[in-house]
Image (cartoon, rainbow, N blue to C red):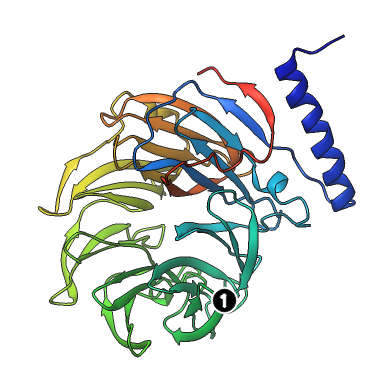
Amino acid sequence: MMFPKKIRFYFFTTIIVAVSVIGCRGDVEMHLSETIELGYPREVTDAVGFYLLNEGNMGSNKSTLDYMDFSTGNYKRNIYAEVNPMVPKELGDVGNDLQIYGNKLYAVINCSNKIEVMEARTAKRIGQIDIPNCRYIRFLGKYAYVTSYAGPVEVNPNYTQKGFVAKIDTATLQEVDRCIVGFQPDELAIVNGKIYVTNSGGYMGAGNLKNYERTVSVIDLNTFKEEKRIDVDYNLHRIRADQRGNLWVGSRGDYKGHPSRLYFIDRKQQRVTDTIPTGVSNMYLSGDSLYVYSVEWSHITNTNEITYAIVNTLTRKIESRNFISDGTDKLIKIPYGILVEPKTKDIYVTDAGNYVSPGLLYCFDKDGKKKWSVRTGDIPAHFALLPIEKQDTIPTDTVQTNKIIYKN
């Protein structure tokens, strides 16, 4: 039986890739990538698409990378393995952050103690940066700054290893300095010559609220030394700098009686001057609008209480109590990642589901109405927009994949 020319091309290419990969990897299992035609192509403006890093379940070595192409409306799932067939363990264990800087794509792989560095246009591996228990990465000038828990993954109220921020030369991918901060530092923001780092003390909580950290470390960029701490609240995690250089910080609380909250740090006063009554699991800043969602376990109802909100960072008021307007939020079990596209204002929210099987990615228009959804890898979490270039090419065109027509 003869295949139509287009189908034959995909079919035989897939076989060739599969055979060559098996030969390279020996006994290591690898899942071929897939292309899903969503049917929503659009004009490319400032970004050609985005990458989505799926965390994968801890200990399972299942972190994967997906790509959404705006011009074709195609979603390409699990592209890293085929682009990089010689990498034995693929991306690694627990993808914790994803950023594009210059012509490089950086994936922070927490439990594999490394940052995977790739070409931004192709996802082809360049190398790796070895950082123990690494968490989040940000950039300024020729350097990358990475938070690290420093010690092993271990819930222990007597944990003694403080975390640090590593300074990485982006040309050589080598660590050139480090600054000790608090226990279990998470996100960081760089603004006005300072690095602001949220210290969580997450390993030390263990049911005791006072064991958590509750400060933001302030590092002077010139000296690369911690110059002060700003007291905020227990178990800090997220941090964003708005257009005026002020900081928005999310506390996770203690998952019991002390609730999650959003705090405002005035950059001039260097202290908390406002509290916004909304929980924070994750947030995305688009202009003056801070899109925030929260997942908090209620010991009263024994269920997760999920909220979505938009906070105006200029007025410091909640503008919306749900940025999903069509009821689709009821379908999302565990919101886990968020992106707001700059030009269209399309809102992307991921659903981690049960944490052990493939999740979902939802796309909503600027009014909060669902446009489409698609299956992802396990625990979809971190987005990175790929900026447009002249004569841009699709990042994964060098690899032909299984082709799937997706219907919503």
Front residue of 100 and 194: 100
- At which x and y percent is residue 94? 61, 57
Q: Residues within 10 Å of mark 1 (few under 14, many from 20)?
A: few
Question: Which residue is farthest front?
Answer: 391
**What secondary structure is found at the residue carrying circle 1?**
loop
Give whichever of 289, 139 is nearer the camera. Answer: 139
Q: Is residue 13 left or right of residue 183?
A: right
Q: Residue furthest left?
A: 315
Picture coordinates of residue 164, whole percent (x, y): 47, 81
**Residue 301, visible in the rendered structure:** no
**Residue highlighted by disc 1:** 172
Name the side, left or right, on which 69 lies relative to 28: left
Residue 217 visible in the current orientation: yes
Front-most of residues 208 and 81: 81
Position of residue 338 in the picture relative to residue 29 (left or right): left
Q: Amino acid at mark 1?
A: Thr
Residue at 50% x, 18% y is: 408
Number of numbered markers: 1
Picture quadrant where residue 376 is located: top right
Position of residue 12 measured from the top left corner of the image (x, y, whole percent):
81, 27
- Whether 265 is drawn above or below 81: the answer is below
